[in-house]
Image (cartoon, helix red, strand yellow):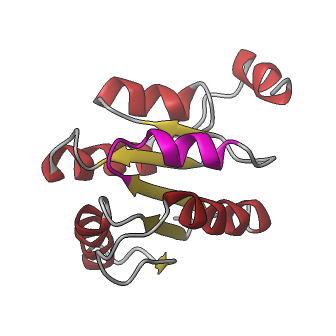
Amino acid sequence: MRKIFISSDHAGFNLKECIKNNLIKNRIKVIDLGPSNNNKVDYPLFAHKLSKKVQQNIKYIGILVCGSGTGMCITANKYKKIRAAQCFSEKSTKLSRLHNDANVITLGSRLISKKKALKFINIFLKTKFEGGRHLKRIRRI
């Protein structure tokens, strides 16, 4: 399994910690890029930090959590080699990997439960890119 970078803003801090602890419990290597508490922060700073790390370590994946998942997703997708997907259902999560080879998942802590978030992370980690016709499309991004 690839190593995982994880980060959030203040709104996503508690969910980030839950996800991180669950991954560690399952013996998955997680590198927490912050923040270290739920004090107010600007989400782009943490999305930039994680995106640069994934961009430099392309075999790693990223998990970003903010209130909606949207701001983190927009910021992460500014980087070459980053394909961030805002996941809000099991199907959107699975397709983000199968068809888009997403390497960063963004989640909205104010929109989904912890249980769903953990389920989406599990799907994201276990789903492999289909390749084939999708590879041509990925190369056009």
In-image side of 67 versus 99 (left or right)? left
Res. 59 visible in picture = no
User: Foreground: 15 or 5?
Assistant: 15
Whether residue 140 appears in magenta in the rendering, the answer is: no
User: Foreground: 77 or 25?
Assistant: 77
Quadrant assignment for the C terminus: top right
User: Foreground: 98 or 92?
Assistant: 92
For image coordinates 69% across by 28% down, the residue present is 131
Q: Position of residue 30 (x, y in %)?
A: 45, 76
The image shows residue 65, relative to residue 127, as above or below, that is: below
For image coordinates 30% across by 68% down, the residue present is 13
In-image side of 25 versus 115 (left or right)? right
Q: Position of residue 133 (x, y in %)?
A: 74, 15
The picture quadrant where one finds residue 98 is: top right
Whether residue 70 appears in magenta in the rendering, the answer is: yes
Res. 87 visible in picture = yes
Q: Position of residue 41 (x, y in %)?
A: 44, 69
The picture quadrant where one finds residue 134 is: top right
User: Most extreme residue toward the top, as rendered?
Assistant: 133
For image coordinates 29% across by 65% down, the residue present is 19
In-image side of 79 versus 6 (left or right)? right
Report how many numbered discs are placed on residues in the image: 0
The image shows residue 25, relative to residue 7, as above or below, that is: below
The picture quadrant where one finds residue 40 is: bottom left
For image coordinates 53% across by 35% down, the residue present is 97
Segment colored magenta: 66-77
